[in-house]
Image (cartoon, helix red, strand yellow):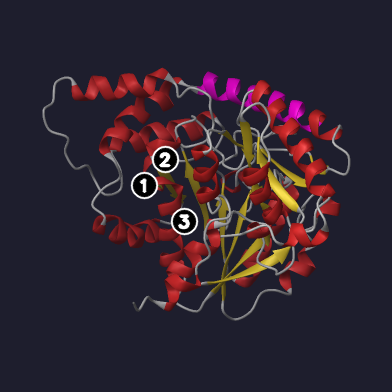
Amino acid sequence: MNYSSRVQAMDASPIRKLYPKELEARARGLHVIHANIGQPDLPTPDAFRQGIVDYLTPRTTLAYGPSEGLPEFRRACADFYQRQGIEVLPRHILATTAGSEALLFVLLAICEVGDEILVPEPFYTNYRTFCFMAGVRLVSIPTYWETGFSLPPLSEIETFVTDRTRAILFCSPGNPTGVVYSRESIDALLELCMQKNLWLVADEVYRDFTYVGQPYSILQSHIQWEKRIVVDSLSKRYSACGSRLGLIVSYDPGLLAQILKMAQARLCPPTLDQQGAIAMIDSSDRAILDMKDTYARRIGHLCALLDAIPGVSYIKPLGSFYVMVRLPVEDSERFASYLLEEVAVDGRTLMVAPAAGFYATAGRGRSEIRLAAVLDEMQLTQVAEILRIGLEKYAQLPATNRAMVELK
């Protein structure tokens, strides 16, 4: 069979590529604890369900909506931003089918095939996939464990800019690192984009889960650069990952008009989910704060458990709900496979996300994993226990045996 070079060049998701190993573990009767994926276990606010019920009750047909999103949905989102001190009106918002579509639409709208975007590394692995889909080259800006993955000096970032560079894309609070860029760092990026005539694209999906200081959006900056775009989503903010609703927020009406052409081709974002989201957004600010407090406790609990495991270190996140963990192993992907194949504690095993897939630079992140603190304290205790026992067993293997752990 002949497949396109584009699709063949794409990597499998490092978050999901161990799924066949999970199936094998489940076939052996094991319960697999998922610390590999950011799927919150907290309840979606009840207003979401009620909004759907209220919408469906007098109707027998679920109809298309506007391609840019329902007016009431865009109004609710704008009101939410306003309550956070971010000056956004409904006309600045285009609704998308999740943040994934939002980012893909943005790349297709601002880049030609062969153009480049700069992304701090490590980064959300699907950025690379979206770039492949759009024919865009992702150029990574290295950030480092030793500095908590903070941004390098602006002079260093500037060295990555070429005549093909069209944008800088960043995520703060960060996935996978939990880093939160300072107001000064974000404003410096805006200044650089002004100087070089670049777009600045901010993935602010985790903005509400900021644990140190106040959340900061590029839309709050005093630097009035018109080429700034926010990609946002309801998935994490409301523990509603299956709703698949996202947003593009821009003060540039021309950009949104161009993106609307693509939005029209896919007809509309999901009508039913928007109806549930309208009621949820209008009434669930308190629920977001409660979720933030819960994640902060869970992160503290997980980090305390990791402190007790010999040879393990981590970067305590300042935002989001991910923890980057460094293990005393040479290849965390092989170790992750070994956990699923060989380690069980009280009928449970563990799935983690090897970190090498979050890097574009070959060889980086090989001893690191990302853990998602989206589980309750009891399960996080089990995560740490399985991890500890797994590391002890793995260390006892001869080096040749560790190298033979299968990766499929």
Q: Is any atom of residue 173 visible in this view?
A: no
Q: Read off the magenta span.
A: 285-303
Q: Which residue is mark 3?
A: 103
Mark nearer the viewer, 2 or 3: 3
Q: Residue 224 at x, y = what percent? A: 58, 54
Q: Give the quarter of the figure containing the N terminus.
A: bottom left
Q: Amino acid at mark 1?
A: Thr
Q: Residue 52 lies in magenta, yes or no?
A: no
Q: Amino acid at mark 2?
A: Leu
Q: Which residue is mark 1?
A: 97
- Whether 311 is drawn above or below 365: the answer is above
Mark 1 packing: few (<14 Cα in 10 Å), some, or many (20+)? many
> For the residues marked 1 and 3, what is the alpha-carbon distance in whole angstroms?
10 Å
Mark nearer the viewer, 2 or 1: 1
Q: Residue at x 29, y 41 (%)?
A: 270
Q: Secondary structure at mark 2?
A: loop
